[in-house]
Image: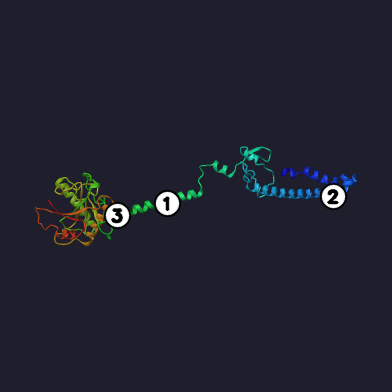
Amino acid sequence: MLVVLNSRLFASIIERRLVRLPYAYEGDDQWSGSRWAIDSLLECAGAKCFTFMLATARSVAASGSSRLNRDSPINWLRKVDGSWEEDLEGGARQNERTPLLLAAGGRGVRSGGQLGEYHTPKQRRSADPNKVHPIALLLMLGLVVFLLLGVAIGVYLLVLQLDRPWPVSHPFFLVDRAAWWHHPVELHAPALDRTAITDVIVLHTHTIGCFTQEDCLRFLQRTEDNCWATGKEHIPFNFLIGGDGVTYEARGWKSQHGFTDLPGHNTTLVVGLIGDFTERQPPEVQYAELKALFTESIRRFSLSAHYRIHGVTRGAQSAGDATALYSQLQRWPHWAGLVAV
């Protein structure tokens, strides 16, 4: 209907009718006056109505065309090779495009008259389904960070759950066996079950003490030589602590102790304090190093956090052996009593 009203053919017919209207009643005297007046009035009224209808139709057509151009997918048409893009709303190009081309499988006319493919935004999004949106990527990264943070906090709280014998202010000093070992035969001893170490036996060497690293190293060498000369056995202690506040590795954390009369070869560490502590107390630095050794053994998972400390009383000797040492150890939280041998 809009095409008919807007056509030049229809407008020209109305104009010619208005021009011929005065000449239609020239030969008729009876009707020439009133009939011509009525017909001219009707023709003028029709012309006014037609003009109003034509203006209204053109306004409606213009507004509909503008909305169609704004909302139509034609505004989103893009050429595949990226040589040009069409934007009807922006007015960049005024070339006529028909929506029928979009319905025909997404085909369009290129500048050279050839057919090309064009895609709407929805078609372009569906063409790459594996593409990750940046916001989604940020959310996934945030979740990973929170997960790692939760794991770190959990591990930290788990470490805090481990029982510590006491706060250790004295640092742990260890001299490896290789620093003092001069025996031609390497140490060979049964392996210790590290997951079952629950007991620690503390002895004193019942000898003179050592207060320098040089004297303590000579003590370990003499002890090794005497043990090998008398029974073809290596030094029996797992560790020895000198009066200089240093721990010296003998058999270490991985080998069983060598005392035949002491129990728990596979579940016990034997630690000796160099000196005679029956009547006098060991130096404070020696006690501090003993605590540091316990803490380091727990940290290395070589000693249970619920370990027990034992002393030794020998029936063939005086009951007062290492009395001063054990009187102090009895005040420690992991003390479990004396072992009679």
Amino acid under disc 3? Gln
Q: Residues within 10 Å of mark 3 (few under 14, many from 20)?
A: few
Amino acid under disc 1? Val
Question: Which sits in the foreground, 316 or 302?
Answer: 302
Q: Earlier in the sequence, mark 1 or mark 2?
A: 2
Contact between marks 1 and 3 (CB within 8 A): the answer is no
Q: Is residue 39 above or below residue 292?
A: above
Question: Which sits in the foreground, 327 or 287?
Answer: 327
Residue 121, percent from left and from top:
58, 45
CA gap between label 1 and label 3 equals: 25 Å
Residue at image position (14%, 59%) is 323
Whether residue 179 sits left or right of residue 143 in the image: it is left
CA gap between label 1 and label 2 equals: 93 Å
Disc nearest the viewer among 2 and 3: 2
Q: Earlier in the sequence, mark 2 or mark 3?
A: 2
Residue 307, percent from left and from top:
22, 52
Residue 244 occupies which quadrant of the picture?
A: bottom left
Is residue 147 among what the camera can see? yes
Residue on which disc 2 sits: 37
Q: Is residue 111 above or below residue 63?
A: above
Assign the N terminus to one quadrant of the image: top right
Q: Which residue ends up furthest to the front in the rendered image?
A: 30
Please, what secondary structure does the residue beneath circle 3 have? helix
**How are the residues colored?**
rainbow
Residue on which disc 3 sits: 161
Residue at image position (74%, 43%) is 4
Residue on which disc 1 sits: 145
